[in-house]
Image (cartoon, rainbow, N blue to C red):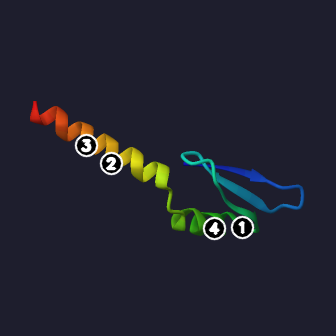
């Protein structure tokens, strides 16, 4: 999940809503934003997924 904003000059910024890192700034097209966001490795999201998987595994064990 990302928050996109458009700058006064028409370019875009995008921020990850998991880790709040600015993934890109001054990107010219929405297509380019898609590419940049697809390459973003978010440690917060990965950690969240691991915790959820571990919790689910623990629930099934009991």
Which label sits on residue 50? Answer: 2
Q: Are marks 2 and 1 in contact (CB under 8 Å)?
A: no
Is residue 15 or residue 44 the one in the foreground? 44
Which label sits on residue 48? Answer: none
Distance, label 4 to label 3, CA atoms, is 35 Å
- Which residue in the protein does label 4 denote? 31
What residue is shown at x 18% (from left), y 32% (from top)?
A: 59
Q: Is residue 17 left or right of residue 5?
A: left
Query: Compared to 52, does 62 lie above or below?
Result: above
Q: Is residue 62 left or right of residue 42?
A: left
Give the percent coordinates (x, y) of residue 17. Answer: 58, 45
What residue is shown at x 36% (from left), y 47% (from top)?
A: 49
Q: Are marks 3 and 2 in contact (CB under 8 Å)?
A: yes
Give the percent coordinates (x, y) of residue 20. Answer: 62, 47
Q: Are marks 1 and 4 in contact (CB under 8 Å)?
A: yes
Which of pointers 4 and 3 lies earlier in the amino acid sequence? 4
- Which residue in the protein does label 1 denote? 29
- Which residue in the protein does label 3 denote? 54
């Amino acid at each position: 999940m990302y928050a996109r904003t458009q700058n006064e000059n028409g370019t875009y910024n995008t921020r990850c809503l998991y880790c709040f890192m600015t993934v890109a700034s001054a990107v010219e097209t929405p297509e380019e934003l898609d590419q940049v966001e697809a390459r973003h490795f978010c440690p917060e999201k990965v950690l969240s997924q691991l915790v959820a998987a571990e919790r689910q595994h623990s629930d099934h064990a009991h």
